[in-house]
């Protein structure tokens, strides 16, 4: 199960960094549910806080 959580957090970190905590939290929860993982609210909140505080990945021109 932890591998699924790590995978989802990695994907969301790449796609949602710098966005609001609420958006990041919802995306993590949605992705975890698609893998059959019941989200741990405290853990998801910690990940969302960390991911939202990262700068967005610049788009290559």
Image (cartoon, helix red, strand yellow):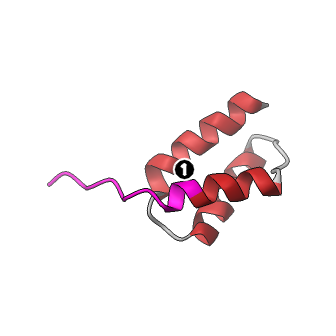
Q: How many numbered marks have been drawn onto this rendered protein structure?
A: 1
User: Label 1: how many residues lie within 10 Å, few (<14), some (14-19) or many (20+)?
Assistant: some
Residue drawn 79% across and 31% down?
Answer: 1
**Rendering coords of residue 44 (x, y %):** 72, 54
Main SS category, magenta section: loop
**Rendering coords of residue 31 (x, y %):** 67, 50
Quarter of the figure with residue 36: top right
Image quadrant containing the C terminus: bottom left
Residue drawn 44% across and 63% down?
Answer: 18
Residue drawn 60% across and 44% down?
Answer: 9
Q: Residue farthest to the left?
A: 61
| Residue 7 colored in magenta in the image | no
Query: Relative to 50, is 29 on the left or the right?
Result: right
From the viewer's perspective, is residue 36 above or below residue 17? above
Q: Secondary structure at mark 1?
A: helix
Q: Is residue 29 visible?
A: no
Quarter of the figure with residue 45: bottom right
Q: Is residue 39 visible?
A: yes
**Rendering coords of residue 39 (x, y %):** 81, 51
| Residue receiving disc 1 | 12
Residue drawn 62% across and 58% down?
Answer: 48
**Rendering coords of residue 37 (x, y %):** 81, 42
Identify which residue, 37 or 18, lies in the foreground: 18
Range of residues picked out in magenta = 50-61
Query: Relative to 1, is 52 on the left or the right?
Result: left
């Amino acid at each position: 199960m932890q591998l699924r959580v790590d995978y989802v957090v990695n994907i969301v970190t790449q796609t949602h960094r710098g966005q609001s905590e609420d958006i990041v939290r919802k995306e993590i929860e949605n992705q975890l549910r698609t893998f059959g993982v019941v989200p741990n609210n405290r853990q998801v909140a910690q990940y969302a806080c960390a991911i939202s505080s990262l700068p967005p990945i610049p788009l290559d021109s």
